[in-house]
Image: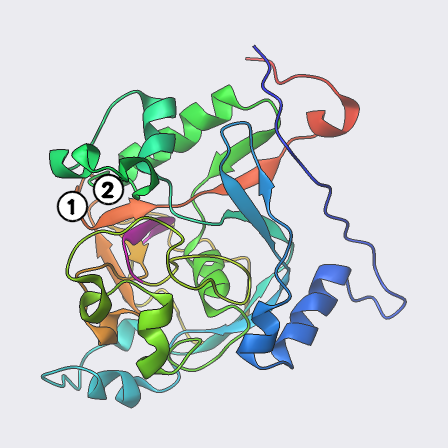
Amino acid sequence: MRFSGKRQRFGCACLSTGVTWPGLLAIILLSLPIRIAAALQPEVITNWLGMPFVTIPAGSFQMGTSDRQAAIREMDEPNLDAFRDEQPVHVVRISRPFLLGQTEVTQDQWLKVMENRPGPKEYWDRVDWRDLPVVSVSWHMAQRFTEELSKLDPDYDYRLPTEAEWEYAARAVSSGLRPMPGNELPEHAWFIASSGDHLHPVATRRPNAFGVYDMLGNTWEWVADWYAPDSYGDGEMRIDPTGPADGRSRVRRGGSYHCPLFQTRPGYRSANTPDTRYSVIGFRVVAIALPSQANGTEKQW
């Protein structure tokens, strides 16, 4: 069965200077205040299931936390040894644009693909259950979702974002602890000071400058990488890093509705074994356009 999905081609034509159009967009956004940059939202495309995606342009950013002391001061009980795994700050280049889920995967999307209902029953009984992020999914379950969704969709394959892709998208051309002052975070994120300590529907806070919702707060998000406290190495520049080759835990990012301020920022790193299932952990996915889109053939399985 072939499903019809909306799609848009995203060109990568080079300027005479050798800079790609997505790269030029990133340069322009970097030079603008975040509120102005937010007005330049990329166009949203949807797949056959109705999942919205935005194009994150290629570009470079500083991965990690440059001011660890500022992050420590946000803690109720400052810990001078905290956040060492967020350093050294190093330049990462994301070499090509990628399509990132505009929101976390929702319960409705999960149910349509996986045909089961993980997580607390109370979330499935709510009037707004369709728009809640799916939670209580392990890393393995999130990975399985990407595989099943890929089988169903004739136009795209899917995967979890890398840790570097996730932080790049969360920073949205910003630097510092987060893309906005701490006192403005409640406008952008459901965390303990704004959430009432419960889960909220996706896309009910303000998007970031890339047009992505809920990168901070609401649910933690599994990413593809294995975790290692020293994975930032010696601080040398990296291109499209994918993390350690193996490990015991997988990285999760972004904080949740239950998290305090100091954890709700792009640079904060956490991890759990890949079979962990918490009611504060969800995920979002990356879509990869298939060559069959260009020639009109269907995916063969």
288 to 61, vertically: above or below? above
Picture quadrant where residue 59 is located: bottom right
- SS under mark 1: loop
* Residue 97 left/right relative to 169: right
Label 1 packing within 10 angstroms: few (<14), some (14-19), many (20+): some
Query: Is residue 219 rendered magenta in the image?
Result: yes
On the image, the x and y values in percent for residue 207 come to: 47, 62
What distance separates the C-alpha of mark 1 from that of mark 2? 7 Å
- The reply to whether the C-beta atoms of the residues labelled 1 and 2 are less than 8 Å apart is yes
Residue situated furthest right in the rendering: 16
Three-letter code for the amino acid on which mark 1 is drawn: Tyr
Q: Main secondary structure of the magenta part?
A: strand
In this rendering, which labeled residue sits more in front, label 1 or label 2?
2
On the image, the x and y values in percent for residue 108 come to: 34, 31
Residue under the point 69% across and 75% down: 28
- SS under mark 2: loop
283 to 297, vertically: above or below? below
In the picture of the structure, the residue carrying the numbered disc 2 is 135
* Residue 275 left/right relative to 27: left
* Residue 190 left/right relative to 136: right
In the picture of the structure, the residue carrying the numbered disc 1 is 278
Three-letter code for the amino acid on which mark 2 is drawn: Val
Residue under the point 32% across and 51% down: 221
The C terminus lies in quadrant: top right
User: Which range of residues does the magenta coloring cover?
Assistant: 217-226
The N terminus lies in quadrant: top right
Residue under the point 20% across and 78% down: 82
Say which label, 1 or 2, has the lower sequence index.
2
Task: Name the residue nearer the viewer: 54 or 128.
Answer: 128
Picture quadrant where residue 84 is located: bottom left
